[in-house]
Image: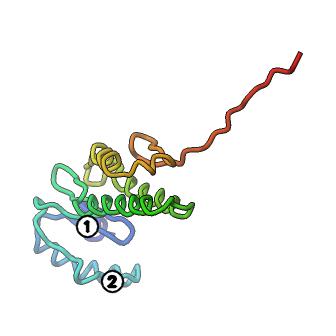
Amino acid sequence: MLKKEIGISNYGRYVDDFIIIHENKEFLKTLIPALSNFLLSTLKLTLHPNKIYLHHFSKGVKFLGAVIKPNRIYISNRTKGNFYEAIQHHNAIARMHKPDKEEQVAFLSCINSYLGILKPAKATQLGQYYKTYKLRQTMIKRYLSAWWWNLFSLSGGCEKFISKSRRVKNTFHLPAP
């Protein structure tokens, strides 16, 4: 809809979130009613009046936990802070008692969710990437309690936690002579 009907090519969208980047602020203001009408009539969605932001692109555009700038995409400080708080929450559980199976699954889901958000982005329509290997490595190695390492290990270069499987050694006995 955006590219075809309105002539916007610099935009990003994910589920019900979207950004539009254009050099003319007045042009963007004129798009608001057209977008609002399209969303309501076609998708039965409404624009939240408090979530429309118009500012200069050089300050960065916050979108899906990242800040998009002309030459780079950064992970937002809020996303980093939330990841740190999630790690601290799960560390507190491990300090209080041995986490049960449900808490272990919650840990795995939560931490992998953040690692997924922080995973290197593929090229977007805007042609940008972000690099987070050092951030992921620092957050996990510096802040994650050693207790969790008894149950889980990292896979794919700090991209995902997996359960350590308990392997039973195959023992072969030679038959008695």
Relative depth, front residue between 87 and 70: 87
- Identify the residue shown where x is 11% and y is 61%: 59
The outermost residue toward the top is 177
Q: Which mark is residue 19?
A: 1
Bin the neighbour count of mark 2 within 10 Å (Cα to Cα): few under 14, some 14-19, many 20 and up: few
The outermost residue toward the right is 177
Mark closest to the chain's N terminus, 1 or 2: 1
On the image, the x and y values in percent for residue 131 come to: 27, 45
Relative depth, front residue between 169 and 125: 169
Location of residue 31 (image quadrant) = bottom left
In this rendering, would 156 be left or right of 136?
A: right
Q: Is residue 22 above or below residue 34?
A: above
Q: Which residue is mark 2?
A: 46
On the image, the x and y values in percent for residue 21 come to: 19, 64
Tell me if label 1 and label 2 are in contact, CB under 8 Å: no
On-image quarter of the N terminus:
bottom left
- Identify the residue shown where x is 45% and y is 46%: 149
In this rendering, would 108 be left or right of 3?
A: right
- Identify the residue shown where x is 37% and y is 57%: 114
In this rendering, would 168 be left or right of 133?
A: right
On-image quarter of the C terminus:
top right
Element type at mark 1 = strand
On the image, the x and y values in percent for residue 153 come to: 47, 44
Q: Is residue 138 above or below residue 41?
A: above
Q: Amino acid at mark 2?
A: Thr
Q: Which mark is residue 97?
A: none
